[in-house]
């Protein structure tokens, strides 16, 4: 019984570490852009790009983003931040 409880506790603890970052996506219009912090806002959510961000559908860099542009953003939520993994123009 004690062994089962230890295994259960270990499994729960491990799953908490695995869930500390998760991927998701959102579609919408870019509401604002902050070039200094390399962030932009869609649906009220601030997204941050980094050197691993992949730009698709004609986008080549952060500088190609424009307010009012409709995009699809794939991101990881990690440490309270929305880190963009892929961004593309949404048709």
Image: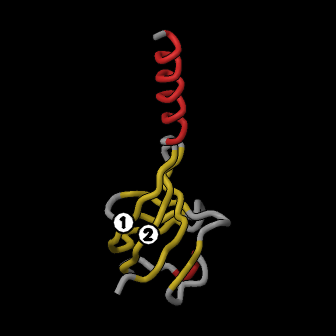
Please determine whether, in this image, residue 33 is positioned above or below residue 4.
Answer: below
Element class at badge 1: strand
Is disc 2 surrounded by few (<14), some (14 to 19) or many (20+) residues within 10 Å? many
Q: Which residue lies furthest to the top in this view?
A: 2
> Residue 12, image x and y in percent?
47, 28
Please determine whether, in this image, residue 9 is positioned above or below residue 43.
Answer: above
- The quadrant in which the C terminus is found is bottom left
- Which of the 4 image quadrants contains residue 90? bottom left
Q: Looking at the image, which is closer to me, 86 or 81?
A: 86
Q: Is residue 52 left or right of residue 81?
A: right
Element class at badge 2: strand
> What is the CA distance from the residue labelled 1 to the residue labelled 2?
5 Å
Q: Earlier in the sequence, mark 1 or mark 2?
A: 1
Q: Mark 2 points at which residue?
A: 73
> Residue 23, image x and y in percent?
46, 57
Q: Name the residue under label 1.
A: 26
Q: Residue furthest bottom?
A: 58
Please determine whether, in this image, residue 88 is positioned above or below residue 77.
Answer: below
């Amino acid at each position: 019984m004690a062994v089962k409880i230890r295994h259960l506790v270990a499994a729960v603890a491990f799953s908490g570490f695995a869930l500390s970052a998760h991927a998701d996506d959102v579609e919408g219009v870019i509401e604002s852009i902050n070039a200094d912090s390399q962030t932009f806002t869609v649906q009220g959510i601030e997204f941050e790009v980094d050197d691993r961000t992949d730009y698709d559908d004609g986008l080549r860099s952060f500088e190609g983003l424009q307010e009012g542009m409709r995009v699809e953003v794939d991101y990881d939520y990690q440490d309270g931040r929305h880190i963009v993994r892929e961004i593309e123009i949404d048709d």
